Amino acid sequence: MTISTILILILILILIGAVPAWPHSRSWGYGPSGIVGVILIVVLVLLLMGRI
């Protein structure tokens, strides 16, 4: 596994953990999952462009 694959897997796990449906993150709102989602999209775009 390369570092970019590991980074994407970690970001996906963080995104799933920050979804407001879970009891521990219900009071957080959509902010954390939205921020992590944007970071994940940026990393995927950079990966597809060959920058990572």
Image (cartoon, grey):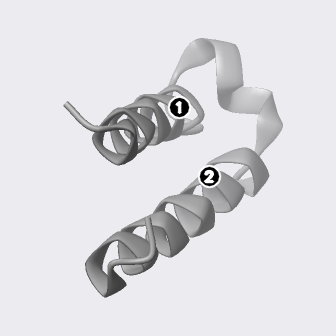
Could you tell me the amino acid type at mark 2? Val
Q: Is residue 32 above or below residue 14?
A: below
Q: Residue furthest bottom?
A: 49
Quadrant in which the N terminus appears: top left
Left or right: 45 as drawn, with respect to 33 = left
Quadrant in which the C terminus appears: bottom left
Do the residues under discs 1 and 2 have CB atoms within 8 angstroms? yes
Q: Which mark is residue 35?
A: none
Left or right: 51 as drawn, with respect to 38 = left
Q: Position of residue 37 (x, y in %)?
A: 54, 60
Q: Which mark is residue 36?
A: 2
Residue at figure coordinates x 80%, y 36% from the top left: 28
Q: CA distance from mark 1 to mark 2?
A: 7 Å
Could you tell me the amino acid type at mark 1? Ile
Residue at figure coordinates x 29%, y 42% from the top left: 5
Q: Is residue 31 above or below residue 25?
A: below
Sequence-wise, which precedes: disc 1 or disc 2? 1
Q: Position of residue 3 (x, y in %)?
A: 39, 37
SS class, disc 1: helix
**Residue closer to the observer: 20 or 5:** 5
Residue at figure coordinates x 70%, y 59% from the top left: 35
Q: Residue furthest top?
A: 24
SS class, disc 2: helix
Residue at figure coordinates x 49%, y 59% from the top left: 40
Numbered circles on residues, count: 2
User: For residue 48, which quarter of the picture?
Assistant: bottom left
Question: Could you classify mark 2 by the number of other residues whose Cα lies within 10 Å: few (under 14), some (14-19), or many (20 or more)?
Answer: some
**Residue closer to the observer: 4 or 15:** 4
Left or right: 17 as drawn, with respect to 30 = left
**Residue closer to the observer: 30 or 43:** 43
Residue labelled with disc 1: 14
